Amino acid sequence: MAKKIKITLVRSMIGRPEKHRRVLRAMGLTRMHKTVVFEDNASVRGMADKVSHLVNVEEVLT
């Protein structure tokens, strides 16, 4: 079974560079404390690393 990761926006994107905002919007994180679940792959991990100071990443056990 494929692993999944849960990403939660914990810091505001106000005052952040446009690149960071685009990454968050592409991931579906538009509001504080919103959580999304993705398949664990390199592209999602890379996006999470770009905004690691704004999000929490957790592995989901299924």
Image: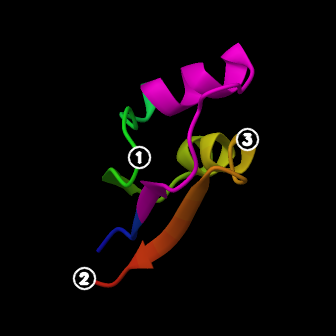
Tag 2 secondary structure = loop
The answer to whether residue 14 is magenta is: yes
Q: Quadrant of the C terminus?
A: bottom left
N-terminal label among 3 and 1: 1
Residue 31 is left or right of residue 44, and the answer is left
Q: How many marks?
A: 3
Q: Is residue 36 above or below residue 57?
A: above
Chain-order first, disc 1 or disc 2: 1
Dot 1 amino acid type? Met
> Which residue is disc 3 drawn over?
50
Residue 45 counted in the magenta span: no
Identified by mark 3, the residue type is Lys
Residue 18 in picture, x, y percent from top left: 68, 15
Residue span colored magenta: 6-25
Q: How dense is the environment of label 3, judged by Cα within 10 Å: few (below 14), some, or many (20 and up)?
A: some
Q: Which residue is mark 1?
A: 32
Query: What residue would you read off at disc 2?
Result: 62
- 23 or 34, which lies in front? 34
Callout 1 secondary element = loop
Tell me the CA gap for discs 1 and 2.
Answer: 25 Å
